Amino acid sequence: MDDGVVTSPLAALSPLALMVRKLETHAILDEDDRRALLALPHTLRTYEPSSYLVREGDAPEQCAVLLSGFAYRQKLTGSGMRQIVSLHVPGEALDFQHLFLDVADHNVQTLTRANVATISRMALRDLAQTRASIGNAIFVNTLVEASIFREWILNVGRRDARSRLAHFLCEFAIRLDMQGLVDETGYELPMSQEQLGDALGLTAVHVNRTIKSLEADGLISRNRRRISFPRWDALREVADFSSRYLHLSPRKP
């Protein structure tokens, strides 16, 4: 599963810089805060697609930060039916909740090949407790995740298939752009139609039809898995999309 393991000291460009950037999307950190976060001892690993980073029932000892690639959270019914409950992009910590909750109540898996930095749970929790601004940033980040969960519940529960998919595509574009991972030609959608269905509460066949419908109306353009948005404002209207729930502006000190 692992291509290699490297323990990284504080460097001019730490792999944890992406995590710091993500935290600063929602909260204010000063230079000492940044240095403290970048100085956290961490281990780098590469995981293949579908690798488990968190397993339901485990007691995690590490906090994983996604450096490249994508990951998702999922819950399973007793009969094995899967619901994908969130998608994660580079820079995001995958289990801040386990700084204070001792047992995982869901699974986290890699969606694609992914580079991950793992930080000691205790080291990160100690830093959050001793530096109030870092603790606040982690708390706010967790609240924003909860806001996204609420929007996903609304999406699956009350929007039709066309709006659900359009909303998902809009959100993914905004979140990638926040991390500097979108260009003028759009982005690579890393999910299969079956995986999209598990996130949207639809069958793969229904996802396929809906994608073709959005494409036929000129709302999206596809080149294999690359998605671009020739009519972005119209797509947002179809999606009933407002970025308010993403809380993009950091709070003022």
Image (cartoon, rainbow, N blue to C red):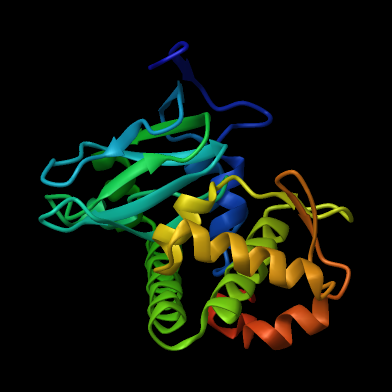
Residue 27: x and y in percent read 54, 69
Residue name at image x 67 percent, y 70 percent: 170
Q: Is residue 199 left or right of residue 74?
A: right
Q: In this orientation, does residue 201 appear?
A: yes
Where 153 sits versus 8, above or below?
below
Using the image as rendered, state which of residue 14 and residue 74 is in the foreground: 74
Q: Residue furthest top?
A: 4
Residue at the spot x=50%, y=20% of the render?
8
Task: Find residue 186 and report its horizontal and vertical position in percent.
Answer: 80, 55
Q: Height in image: 135 above or below 118?
A: below
User: For this rendering, which residue is in front, 102 or 175?
Assistant: 175
Q: Which residue shows up at 47% across the image and 32% down it?
A: 116
Residue 210 image point, x, y percent: 62, 69
Which residue is found at the position 56% from the left and 69% from the top?
Answer: 26
Q: Quadrant of the C terminus?
A: bottom right
4, above or below 48, in the image: above
Quarter assignment of residue 247:
bottom right
Residue 12 falls in image quadrant: top right
Looking at the rendering, in which quadrant would you find the N terminus?
Answer: top left
In front of the other: 178 or 69: 69
Count of all numbered marks drawn on residues in the image: 0
- Residue 164 quadrant: bottom right
| Residue 241 shows in this picture | no
| Apparent side of residue 188 relative to residue 69 in the rendered image (left or right) | right
